[in-house]
Image: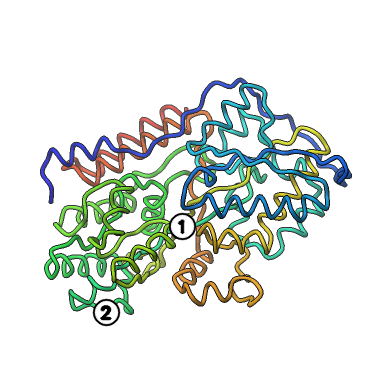
């Protein structure tokens, strides 16, 4: 365990809340979806913009570029649509361009601040711009749980796109050096603790890590113990209940038992890739990078499902993004829909999974030899995550007026609860009360 100065330094490393500038764009009024989409003209292609954070990251850039180019060369050329990709690493460029009056048609958008965007930036519900018949036909084959993730007040303001669940990545060499069998991974938090202590004692390296600033995984931890994060009516936060406190106290014990690695999420990622960490809970999206690191480092990568408390099934939540749309004409409606259909269709998800690293929300593709079966057979850790989709719950979409403040307060409270000597119950209750006072 590091000293107090190290803890204090880490306490300052919180989740970067996505700031929201006062763009002054009001939410669009209620509208009735068209019964049919406008006709597109291949001789006069309609240009649409797609703002994507994946385009800005080296590990995802090539796959996302392939997705866009393949659309433009096939469906886009046939129908009359040209997609321009715009890299947006911090999810700030699309806001600035909307404020400047530039066309922003589709955004690879995060979940937590979706409510803010639909209220202030003109994003539209799918039911208001695309015909019901089109939606119903396209949604067949997509995981039903995934279709619920971007809904607010019963309407879909974002269609789940690049998507992951949390997984326990494991270093097979460190497991074996500690006398553990990586093919029989820990399933409960109690087993995680026991394995981490054995790895630490046998190898001198940290046995386990979960980044204290990893807010979305924290939500799953709370839900898995029967706690609550945000009330169903989205009017109050409720993460300081008894079951939530017990879940974070368990994590605090893990963190302070001497076997938990110290660092924020990006630092822990580096430790795991260097072969210095036995178990690391993080996003499925890091699989390809971890696999390459294990091959280079001479150790084997294993995985396990999100741990559970005793005999309670775990409740993972989702990470990743959705497609939020704001077309401004009937022609743009049709053009945007063609791109959305392609990238969330069979071919789109084949590219996303094999080249970018996220899960296919069309889960049947994993068993289809024409699409993802060969890839999943070679990368069996994906099966763990596909299985978790059956019990996944949505990550919180914070109330729009205070999404940024809630993100910061929640993250701060969790980090402080885990790495400091402060009382968990008092720390979470204080943050909960402050947030609920804002929401009133």
Q: Nearer the viewer, mark 1 or mark 2?
A: 1
Q: Secondary structure at mark 1?
A: helix
Residue at 29% x, 71% y: name it.
299
Q: Nearer the viewer, residue 374 or 26?
A: 374
Q: Which residue is mark 1?
A: 285
Q: Is residue 322 left or right of residue 43?
A: left
Quarter where residue 411 is shown: top left
Which residue in the protein does label 2 denote?
Answer: 181
Callout 2: 10 Å neighbours few (<14), some, many (20+)?
some
Separation of marks 1 and 2 at Cα, in angstroms: 25 Å
In depth, the one of 122 and 179 nearer the eye is 179
In the image, residue 335 lies at what x, y percent? 78, 44
Compared with 440, 60 (above or below) is below
Query: Which mark is first along the chain, 2 or 1?
Result: 2
In the rendered structure, are the residues bearing label 1 and label 2 in contact, judged by CB atoms less than 8 Å apart?
no
The location of residue 26, given as percent across then percent down, is 65, 24
| Residue at position x 80%, y 39% in the image | 46
Q: Nearer the viewer, residue 66 or 431?
A: 66
* Element carrying mark 2: loop
Q: Is residue 298 above or below residue 332?
A: below
Percent of width and height locating residue 192: 26, 66
């Amino acid at each position: 365990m590091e000293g107090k100065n190290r803890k204090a330094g880490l306490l300052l490393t919180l989740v970067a809340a996505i700031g929201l500038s006062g763009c002054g764009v009001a939410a669009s009024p209620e509208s009735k979806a068209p019964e049919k989409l406008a006709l597109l003209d291949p001789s006069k292609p309609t240009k649409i913009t797609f703002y994507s954070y994946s385009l800005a990251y080296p590990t995802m850039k090539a796959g996302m570029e392939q997705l866009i180019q393949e659309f433009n060369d096939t469906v886009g050329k046939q129908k009359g649509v040209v997609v321009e990709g715009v890299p947006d690493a911090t999810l700030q460029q699309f806001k600035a361009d909307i404020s400047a009056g530039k066309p922003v048609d589709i955004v690879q958008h995060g979940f937590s601040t979706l409510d803010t965007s639909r209220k202030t930036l003109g994003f539209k519900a799918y039911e208001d711009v695309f015909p019901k018949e089109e939606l119903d036909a396209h949604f067949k084959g997509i995981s039903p749980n995934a279709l619920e993730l971007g809904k607010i007040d019963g309407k879909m303001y974002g269609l789940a796109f690049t998507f992951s669940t949390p997984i326990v990545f494991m270093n097979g060499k460190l497991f074996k050096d500690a006398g553990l069998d990586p093919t029989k991974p820990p399933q409960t938090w109690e087993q995680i603790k026991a394995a981490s202590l054995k790895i630490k004692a046998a190898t001198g390296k940290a046995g386990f890590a979960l980044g204290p600033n990893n807010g979305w995984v924290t939500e799953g931890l709370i839900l898995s113990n029967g706690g609550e994060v945000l009330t169903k009516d989205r009017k109050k936060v409720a993460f300081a209940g008894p079951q939530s406190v017990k879940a974070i106290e368990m994590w605090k014990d893990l963190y302070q038992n001497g076997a938990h690695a110290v660092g924020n999420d990006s630092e822990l990622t580096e430790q795991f890739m260097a072969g210095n960490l036995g178990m690391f809970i993080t996003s499925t999206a890091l699989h390809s990078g971890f696999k390459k690191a294990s091959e280079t480092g001479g150790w084997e990568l294993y995985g396990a499902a999100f741990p559970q408390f005793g005999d309670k099934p775990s409740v993972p939540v989702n990470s990743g993004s959705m497609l939020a749309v704001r077309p401004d004409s009937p022609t743009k409606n049709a053009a945007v829909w063609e791109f959305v259909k392609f990238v969330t269709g069979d071919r789109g998800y084949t590219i996303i999974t094999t080249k970018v690293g996220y899960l296919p929300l069309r889960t049947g593709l994993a068993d289809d030899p024409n699409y993802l079966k060969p890839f999943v057979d070679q990368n069996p850790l994906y099966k763990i995550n596909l299985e978790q989709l059956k019990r996944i719950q949505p990550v919180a979409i914070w109330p729009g007026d205070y999404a940024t403040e809630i993100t910061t307060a929640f993250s701060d409270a969790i980090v402080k609860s885990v790495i400091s000597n402060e009382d968990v119950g008092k720390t979470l209750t204080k943050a909960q009360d402050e947030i609920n006072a804002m929401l009133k």
